[in-house]
Amino acid sequence: MFHPSSPDANNNACRDRAFERRLMHRKNFAKKKLHDAIQSLVGPGDFNTRISVAASILIHIEDADVPSALTADLDSLKALLATRTLTEETSRIATAAILDLYTALVRIEDP
């Protein structure tokens, strides 16, 4: 019989807390990387360099780093940025998508 004060219950509670800490770290990681990408977009240099830097930052974000509601947006953005040559229009779309994804992530975490 399972009892809330049993060693199994304590182990499960510890595992749950550890999982929550890892999950929060991953979400903070995604938020920081998106913020860094936005900073690179408004930083010095020509736009092609800035969008390339943003893409190189965002490639490190994995689906598990964002809530499931945002994984499709992340995947679409990464696919867009993986295009060998970004046109001016594609670059504008990617820039807006980066900002939108960051905004959505912040809103989900801080309602």
Image (cartoon, helix red, strand yellow):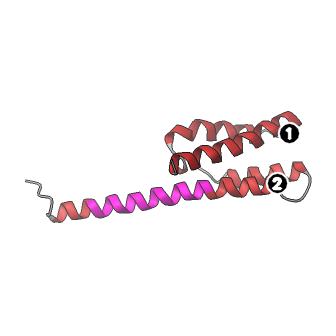
Q: Position of residue 62 (x, y in %)?
A: 58, 49
Say if residue 39 shows up in the picture.
Answer: yes
> Residue at 56% of width from left, 40% of height from top?
70
Q: Position of residue 37 (x, y in %)?
A: 73, 54
Q: Earlier in the sequence, mark 1 or mark 2?
A: 2
Q: Position of residue 5 (x, y in %)?
A: 14, 64
Residue 17 covered by magenta stretch: yes
Residue ranking furthest to the front:
111
37, 105: nearer the viewer: 105
Q: Are marks 1 and 2 in contact (CB under 8 Å)?
A: no
Say if 71 sits above or below 56 in the image: above
> Residue at 77% of width from left, 36% of height from top?
93
- As drawn, is 20 to the left or to the right of 109? left
Which residue is label 2 attached to? Answer: 42
| Residue 90 picture quarter | top right
Look at label 1 and name its amino acid: Thr
Tag nearer the camera, 1 or 2: 2
Which residue is label 1 attached to? Answer: 85
Few, some or many C-alpha atoms within 10 Å of disc 2 (few <14, some 14-19, many ≥20)? Answer: few
Residue 67 covered by magenta stretch: no
Looking at the rendering, the stretch of residues picked out in magenta corresponds to 13-31
Look at label 2 and name its amino acid: Val
Few, some or many C-alpha atoms within 10 Å of disc 1 (few <14, some 14-19, many ≥20)? Answer: few
> Residue at 88% of width from left, 49% of height from top?
47
> Residue at 51% of width from left, 44% of height from top?
67
- As drawn, is 15 to the left or to the right of 29? left
- As drawn, is 111 to the left or to the right of 92? left
